[in-house]
Image (tube, rainbow, N blue to C red):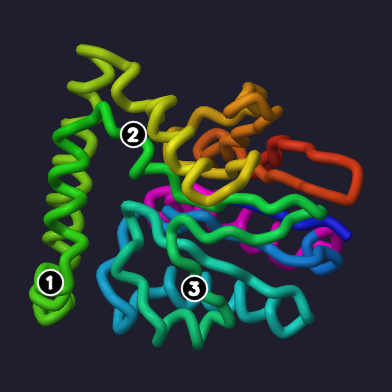
Amino acid sequence: MTTLFISDLHLDDERPHITVLFEQFMASDDVRAAEALYILGDLVEAWIGDDDDAELPQRIAAATRGLADSGVPVYFMHGNRDFLLGQDFARRAGMQLLEDGTVHEVGGTRTLLMHGDTLCTDDEVYQKVRAEVRTEAWKKQVLSMPLEARRAFAAKSRAESREHTGASMASMESIMDVNRDAVCQAMRQAGVTRLIHGHTHRPGMHDFTLDGQAAQRIVLGDWYDHGSVLRIGPETIELRGLPITR
């Protein structure tokens, strides 16, 4: 059977066609026949809390619950956009939460699963902000705000993130990618020779040597211009796009 991986969908009301593509993907025969589906972060553009009463979270929950109810396990790992997603929503959506850096056996190979943002150690500004917002005190403070205040806060944060990303890419695009030493260190600590992650929006399969052994880093693609899915079977590994029908 095939195991599927997706990340960086950034579902948002401003791109309704991507939400439709996600719903079609989740209901497709190909996905319903999979061994498991892994969502490695940034499923949405912004997550403001499990109590969000907007339509988009309800549609997401319906799609993931439908797949889980069909017998396909749905695993979810937090990204930098949806780290406030909690157990309440996960239960409603039929998803099993995974810690960043989880190791699962995939297609007979022990595989390190990450969102990927912690590997971008050259982006010191981002890493500093990440450390601040991941504290329980910060999360508790934000989630205690009224929904409308959280929506406004999320919009402001997205604007600041776009400004930082634009400035970083203009000055030195390489800091937005993973650091090789960080990749090797993470894989050594996990005791694996294969890593799958998202975050960088630079899909590809990178073969290299790690401490004298053949190793592989697979980067998932984003869902902006098209969908992106990694399929791992008993004898095949395929990373390909999904066309958008409008």
Characterize the local packing of mark 2: few (<14), some (14-19) or many (20 or more) Cα atoms within 10 angstroms.
many
Q: Is residue 20 magenta?
A: yes
Q: Which residue is mark 2?
A: 120
Judging from the image, what secondary structure is the residue with disc 3 in? strand
Residue placed at 57% from the left, 35% from the top? 219
Look at discs 1 and 3 and give the one toward the viewer.
Answer: 3
Q: Amino acid at mark 1?
A: Val
Q: Quadrant of residue 88?
A: bottom left
Q: Which disc number belongs to residue 97? A: 3
Task: State the extent of the magenta-drawn residues as a range.
Answer: 7-30
Q: Nearer the viewer, residue 102 or 230?
A: 102
| Rendered view: 174 above or below 71 | above
**Image x and y of residue 137, in percent:** 10, 73
Q: Which residue is mark 1?
A: 142
The furthest residue to the top: 171
Q: Amino acid at mark 3?
A: Leu
Q: From mark 1 to mark 3, how far is it between C-alphas?
A: 21 Å
**Image x and y of residue 150, in percent:** 15, 69
Q: Is residue 9 visible?
A: no
**Image x and y of residue 90, in percent:** 47, 80
Q: From mark 2 to mark 1, how far is it between C-alphas?
A: 25 Å
**Image x and y of residue 170, in percent:** 23, 14
